[in-house]
């Protein structure tokens, strides 16, 4: 019999950053807000499909991506419905796009930006390099389009990676299927209005100028290994979860393992990183996962494939650890019982998102 200890496994009250942590189980229909002791203090029940990415807006509303049945047959990260729920679970806003996947954000002006699949033409598909031969989806390849819509759902801005310069420069990881040219999994609105994007199968982070639609920063490092959850920090650096999956030997010697990197985009230098020093294999999630720099300087890490959420100090000391105790079937994996977590976010009790709601 396999026994996994769940819930809170460690808590250093003096060194951890107090607050409430939001997360959901992949392919579930609940979103939980837990305290530092692992107790559920609030719960949302979704009504539009199983959960994917979610976070709290400053008004305390829950923004979430939910899965719909319609759309392309690509399985990984599929959503299709974006919704905003109030604290009591009432739907206040939604936008449907059955090609939407992985990530989406509601902007301060009420617009929303999200990632969607876009089918390449046969001529474009011939330009796609790399990937596992003959692994297209029914002969089709989908690229990614970043789409911004207004409050009524009208498309007001788009960026897609289906142009010759991109085809010439970036190829699919040789061990990844050819159904997706990009597999974008993060769209992060930056302080200056530009967009930071993560392309998993290229091991690539880019910044797109919102005004010109041009790439103004490109960072490819195969040590990222299919990264997730890139974000801009207050100091202008980029924090990212480096999954370390299918990394070449010259990028990450030995077995695959995960890390969290802080990158200075001015120099492309990795100025901080976390990995398990005792045994690198203790920290590894080949997919999903995320990270968050807390106000204390500590970092919250979501090791998604294990349902593990933990907090580390700048020196790498673990000061809080929680393992998702809620298991459930995942239809894409023969209904295997999983406790995977796509991402997790922590909010202080006095933050605008929480205030006196709990």
Image (cartoon, rainbow, N blue to C red):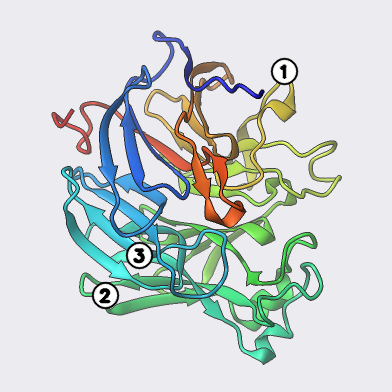
Q: Position of residue 60 (x, y in %)?
A: 20, 42
Q: CA distance from mark 3 to mark 2?
A: 12 Å
Residue named by callout 3? 81
Circle nearer the N terminus (3, 2): 3
**Residue reaching furthest to the bottom:** 123
Q: CA distance from mark 3 to mark 1?
A: 42 Å
**Does the rendering let one see residue 100?**
yes
**Given this view, does label 3 or label 2 mark the residue nearer the observer?**
3
Residue named by callout 1? 278
Residue named by callout 2? 153
At a point 57% along the width and 16% down the height, the residue shown is: 317
Q: Position of residue 326 (x, y in %)?
A: 45, 33
Q: Position of residue 197 (x, y in %)?
A: 51, 59
At a point 31% along the width and 78% down the height, the residue shown is: 156
Image quadrant containing the N terminus:
top right
At a point 75% along the width and 72% down the height, the residue shown is: 135
- How packed mark 3 is, by other alpha carbons closer than 10 Å (few <14, some 14-19, many 20 or more), is many
Q: Please indicate whether residue 204 sits to the left or right of residue 313 in the image.
A: right
Q: To which quarter of the image does residue 275 belong? A: top right
Q: Please indicate whether residue 218 sits to the left or right of residue 26 in the image.
A: right
Q: Position of residue 358 (x, y in %)?
A: 18, 28
In front of the other: 202 or 72? 72
Q: CA distance from mark 2 to mark 1?
A: 49 Å
Circle nearer the N terminus (2, 1): 2
Circle nearer the N terminus (3, 1): 3
Total marks drawn? 3
Q: Please indicate whether residue 328 sits to the left or right of residue 176 in the image.
A: left
């Amino acid at each position: 019999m396999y026994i996994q200890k769940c819930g809170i496994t460690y808590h250093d009250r003096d060194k951890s950053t107090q607050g409430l942590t939001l997360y959901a189980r992949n392919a579930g229909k609940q979103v939980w807000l837990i305290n530092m002791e692992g107790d559920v203090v609030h719960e949302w029940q979704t009504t539009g499909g199983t959960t994917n990415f979610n976070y709290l807006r400053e008004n305390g509303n829950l923004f979430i991506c939910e899965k719909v049945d319609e759309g392309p047959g690509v399985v990984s990260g599929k959503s299709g419905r974006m919704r905003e729920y109030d604290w009591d679970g009432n739907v206040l806003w939604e936008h449907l796009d059955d090609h939407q996947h992985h990530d989406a954000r509601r902007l301060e002006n009420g617009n929303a930006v999200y990632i969607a699949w876009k089918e390449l033409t046969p001529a474009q598909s011939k330009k796609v390099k790399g990937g596992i031969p003959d692994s297209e989806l029914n002969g089709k390849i989908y690229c990614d389009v970043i789409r911004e819509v207004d409050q009524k759902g009208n498309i007001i801005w788009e960026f897609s990676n289906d142009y010759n310069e991109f085809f010439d420069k970036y190829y699919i990881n040789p061990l990844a299927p050819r159904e997706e040219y990009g597999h974008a999994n993060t769209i992060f609105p930056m302080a200056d209005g530009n967009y930071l994007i993560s392309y998993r199968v290229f091991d690539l982070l880019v910044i797109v100028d919102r005004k010109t639609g041009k790439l103004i920063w490109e960072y490819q490092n195969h040590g990222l290994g299919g990264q997730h959850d890139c974000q801009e920090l207050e100091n202008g650096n980029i924090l990212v979860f480096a999954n370390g999956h299918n990394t070449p030997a010259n990028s990450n010697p030995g077995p695959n393992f995960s890390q969290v990197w802080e990158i200075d985009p001015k120099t492309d230098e990795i100025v901080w990183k976390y990995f398990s020093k005792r045994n690198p294999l203790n920290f590894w999630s080949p997919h999903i996962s995320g990270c968050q720099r807390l106000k204390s300087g500590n970092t919250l890490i979501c090791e998604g494939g294990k349902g593990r959420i933990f907090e580390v100090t700048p020196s790498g000391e673990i000061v809080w650890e929680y393992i998702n105790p809620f298991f459930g079937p995942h239809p894409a994996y023969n209904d295997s019982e999983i406790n995977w977590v796509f991402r997790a976010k922590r909010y202080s009790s006095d933050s605008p998102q929480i205030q006196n709601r709990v």
